[in-house]
Image: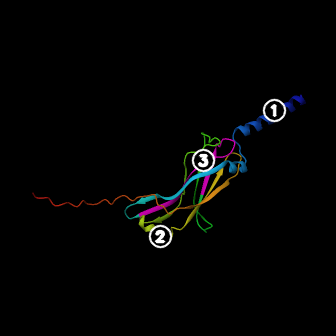
C-alpha cells in the first residue's frame, strides 16, 4: 500500500510539472530574453474633445510589435505601460493590456500592433493651445511585460513624441450666402 501511494505521488508530481510547462509558465529572465520590441511609435491622442466651450484632453500613447527571439511560443503575455513626465516621480497614467492571449507568437514571428494609451493626460483648449501649454511637458513611457509564472520585466523606456494625432472638426456656423450672379 505504501509503495502504491509513493508511485502515485511521484506520478502526480511529474504530471504537475508537465502541466505547468505545457501551460506556458515562463521565468522572468526567459520572458525578457524572448521579447524584442520593434516598430515603436509614440504620440498624443484625444481622450476628450468639446468644441464649446473649447476643451481638449490629450493622452500619451505607445504602439509597438513584439518579436519572439526565444525558443518557445509566447502566449498569455500581459503588458503594462507606465507614463510619466520626465523627472517627475509620480505617474501621469498607465495602461495594462492582456495582449497576447489565445494566438501564440511563435519563435521568429512578430505580433500584431499592440497599443497602450494612458488613462490620464493633459488638458488644454485646442490643438494650437498645446504649443504654449506649460503642463504639456516632455513625457516618457516604461514598458513592462509579464507572463504566467513570471514577474513584470522592464522591456524598455521611450520618449513620447510631441506629435498630436487629432484634428479638430471644422467650425459649424452660418453659411455666407454668395451674391447672385446677374447675367
Q: Earlier in the sequence, mark 3 or mark 1?
A: 1
Q: Secondary structure at mark 1?
A: helix
Q: Is residue 13 above or below residue 50?
A: above
Q: How many labels, in total?
A: 3
Report the residue that reaches farthest toward the left.
183
Q: Please tell me whether residue 62 belongs to the stretch shown in magenta.
A: yes
Q: Secondary structure at mark 2?
A: loop
Residue 154 in the image, given as x and y percentages of width and height: 66, 56
Residue 34 in the image, given as x and y percentages of width and height: 68, 47
Residue under the image location 62 percent in, 47 percent down: 67
Q: Secondary structure at mark 3?
A: strand
Magenta: main secondary structure: strand
Quarter of the figure that contains the N terminus: top right
Residue 61 in the image, given as x and y percentages of width and height: 53, 57
Measure the alpha-carbon separation of dots 2 and 3: 34 Å
- Along the viewing direction, whichever of 33 and 133 lies nearer the viewer: 33
Q: Is residue 109 above or below residue 43?
A: above
Circle 2 residues within 10 Å: few <14, some 14–19, many ≥20: few
Residue under the image location 72 percent in, 48 percent down: 30
Q: Is residue 98 above or below residue 130?
A: above
- Is 72 situated left or right of 165 in this image? right
Q: What residue is shown with label 2?
A: 133
Whether label 2 touches label 1, CB < 8 Å: no
Q: What residue is shown with label 1?
A: 11
Q: Earlier in the sequence, mark 2 or mark 3?
A: 3
Q: Please tell me whether residue 157 belongs to the stretch shown in magenta.
A: no
Circle 3 residues within 10 Å: few <14, some 14–19, many ≥20: some
Residue under the image location 63 percent in, 57 percent down: 156
Whether label 3 touches label 1, CB < 8 Å: no
Rendered image quadrant of residue 3: top right
Which residues make up the magenta segment? 55-81
**Which dot marks residue 98?**
3
Amino acid at each position: 500500500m505504501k509503495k502504491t501511494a509513493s508511485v502515485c505521488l511521484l506520478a502526480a508530481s511529474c504530471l504537475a510539472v508537465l502541466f505547468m510547462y505545457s501551460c506556458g509558465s515562463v521565468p522572468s529572465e526567459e520572458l525578457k530574453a524572448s521579447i524584442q520590441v520593434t516598430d515603436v511609435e509614440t504620440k498624443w491622442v484625444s481622450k476628450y474633445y468639446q468644441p464649446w466651450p473649447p476643451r481638449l484632453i490629450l493622452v500619451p500613447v505607445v504602439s509597438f510589435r513584439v518579436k519572439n527571439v526565444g525558443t518557445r511560443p509566447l502566449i498569455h503575455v500581459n503588458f503594462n505601460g507606465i507614463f510619466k513626465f520626465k523627472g517627475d516621480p509620480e505617474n501621469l497614467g498607465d495602461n495594462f493590456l492582456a495582449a497576447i492571449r489565445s494566438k501564440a507568437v511563435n519563435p521568429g514571428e512578430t505580433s500584431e500592433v499592440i497599443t497602450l494609451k494612458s488613462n490620464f493626460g493633459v488638458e488644454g483648449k485646442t490643438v494650437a493651445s498645446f504649443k504654449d501649454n506649460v503642463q504639456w511637458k516632455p513625457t516618457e513611457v516604461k514598458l513592462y511585460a509579464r507572463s504566467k509564472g513570471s514577474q513584470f520585466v522592464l522591456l524598455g523606456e521611450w520618449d513620447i513624441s510631441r506629435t498630436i494625432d487629432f484634428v479638430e472638426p471644422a467650425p459649424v456656423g452660418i453659411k455666407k450666402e454668395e451674391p447672385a450672379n446677374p447675367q
